Amino acid sequence: MPEKQLGATFAASAFQKQWFANLRRRVFDERQPYALVQADVPFELFDLMDIPAVSNQWWAAIVAAKRQAPAYLDAMSSDGYHDGLCRYCSLGYASTRYRNVQEPPWGGLPTPRLLCARLTCDCIHRVFSLWAEAFGSELFEIDHPGAGELPPRWWELGRHRWRELVEPHRLTFVASTLQRLVERLEAISGRRFEREALRQRMEMVNQQEEVFDAVRRLIATAPEAPVRMTEQISNVMATQWVRGTEWALAHAIAFHDEVKHRVERGIAACPGERARLMWVGAGLWHDTDFYTAFERSHGAVFVWSMYLAFGPDGYIRYGLDDPMAALASRTASFNEYLHNPPWAAEWIVQQARDHRIDGALVLRPRSMKPAATGRLFIERALEEAGVAVLPIEGDVVDARGWDAAAARAAVQTFLETRVIS
Amino acid sequence: MTTNTIVKNSGRMDAVITWPSVPVEIVRAAGLRPTMVRGAPEGTTVTPVADMHLELGIFPSRLRNLVDAALTGRLDSAACIIVPRTSDPDYKTFLYLREFERRGIARSLPPIILFDLLQSEGPDVRTYDAARMMALFEHLASIAGRQPSLDDLRLEIERANAARSAVRRLVELRHVVPRIKGAEVLPLLAAFWLLPPNEFSHLAAEAIDDVVQRPPLDGPRVLLAGAPVDGPSLHATIESHGAIVVEEVGPWGSAAGGEDVDCSGDPMLALADKYRRDAIGPRTPIGPLRHSISRMLENIDAVVVSIPSEDTAFGWDYPTLRDLLAVRRIPHTCLSGDPCGPWTRSDHDRLDMLVGAAETRHA
């Protein structure tokens, strides 16, 4: 892991570790339920019902960052799962099914009361069904109706005109499914869902994302990037999993204030910045040093990833008369925002312009096939916008096929021939 | 018939469909002719234009062929392209085609329609699917310039049910005492999706009259599991080793027809139930699929599991299937090549060994 430059980053890391320890204590000592969920389900509903939710992708990133993924994935291959299957969404399952292979991070996942996933990629139903079987737990699925209409510049519609972003039949279906989820959570927790509490929580989420929007503007407009991409991710994601809570909002503000302070003092993540880079795709969790590897040698700084930028554009919903519908409008189209034409390419190009990006590294995921679609549209749109593109082939959690030296050499050549020259 | 054959012949009443999870009854009742796209053996077709725009290793042969045809003007005269939501590559193909059109990469495409059939088991799915059926019916009717009634739809359901009955009779000649090889019967069964039902029923009856006179085939009986195949190439390869493919997982063979659709009530709900339950693809729920495979194993000597490189779903089922086969002492092998071929020496060696083991069991 690269050294941390911000105090907020230390606080975010400490919070997550403590949060997980509290979760284990609650589950083991107090026999309280918790849920294991995909990153794109509405965490707000779980938190409001006092059922903590652990993100599958967050857990996979922890396992990968601790360099534990290869052993689990080897076990998976030995058991007959072919190497083309998605590793990001299944590493958590592997850590459960092959729990005897090694001691998992932080004591491992306890048995959840419920698993919950949106059925985006074709593999999700299967991975979560197998995982639920391995735990002996219940699975709740939120199906993913396909988008037939995708109006341009989605990020300009999402905040105030979110009803126009999702076709009515899809919005109704997802809102109705979320209502069923609430009914299950009520049954599990013994608590009663309050619509007004959801509205208030979403207002808090709006405030949190407005703060991140301000951070994004600071980063985009500062002469030199004040905060590394890796630290942006640490701070943003620690709050996203508990978004709309008092701690999340307070931490977002603390993060903002520290970034603002750095901008005002002219403190750069990499003094003498010569090239501003963007990372397109999920993070390389097994090799986060990659993102700071070109600062000293080339003055090249990763300025942008989707993790900070997506919050303000993807989560803010104003007009919360029907908070469940507003929540459904956010939930319905995550994949389309981030991976699919036309939405992903036009948003990423806009972000590249706003952040004065010189070069984009676009992940070509080895095993996450659905996430690999739309990539050619994104690469071409960036090049057409004048942003040099370097595709990087790799897996976000599986380090086994990753040649760190070769990848770094490719980036150096890219920087010297297409970005800095 | 491959995709290229279909698109060459497509005319203004043809609804080009990417996977047989679109209700052909609705297409026909609307006044259009369903034409299903299918894969082509590697080396028999090239897709240079599609290859410029589609990421490698994600889109199966049938979709690469379709996109190539769309981008080179070979689908211009079709009435529409219908893409079901029953796999992620299909859904992405829909989004790509729309984007090719928006950006002027495709010159002139017919209307591209997403048929958003969901297959999960939530309580809201049934009514959602029925509403999507109705939306599809109305959209296709407007394209065809017709105003069909629900009675027109019921008539098409009855015709399709008659064809399903013919499928079931044909399937009986594969089971228990097989009289026809898989490679021969698969195109006959697949024709359920391609031919008008009356014509299919007539041709199936002729085939049945012929096959029933044949002597029983001897050889180990093989189930083809894993990702569904849409052509007879793999069947023929397995059978070249002396086995008989008597069953396969997928919509193109024995499961082409399935059970009848009950149209005594709301035909949209009935079709929604039928296609949600019976459509076989990567989003078919794991529970019913396991159940149906378990049933198929009752009269089987060996299993070939085909999991091509672009698979993202069926590979998850393999260890459970392997364990089930071990319990039942049924030998199996896995093939990872394109199910359209070509086949490697190693594939043939695996099949040789499998058939050898199956013969012992069969004896």
Image: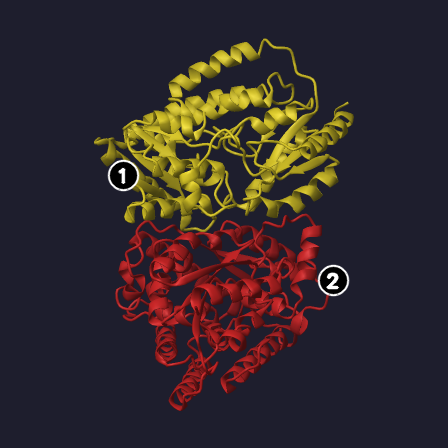
Please name the residue that numbered disc 2 is placed on.
Answer: A100
Question: Mark number for residue A38?
Answer: none
**Chain displayed in yellow:** B
Residue A341 seen anywhere in this rendered image of the structure: yes
Report the amino acid beneath label 1.
Answer: Ser
Q: Chain of mark 1?
A: B
Please name the residue that numbered disc 1 is placed on.
Answer: B108
Indicate the secondary structure of the residue bearing disc 2. loop
Left or right for A364, reference A82: left
> Quick check: marks 2 and 1 in contact, CB under 8 Å?
no
- Residue A168: horizontal and vertical position, in percent? 29, 54
In front of the other: A107 or B156: A107
Q: Quadrant of residue B17?
A: top left
Q: Report the Cα–Cα distance between label 2 and label 1.
A: 57 Å
Residue at (36%, 26%) from the top-left corner? Answer: B8
In front of the other: B275 or B248: B248
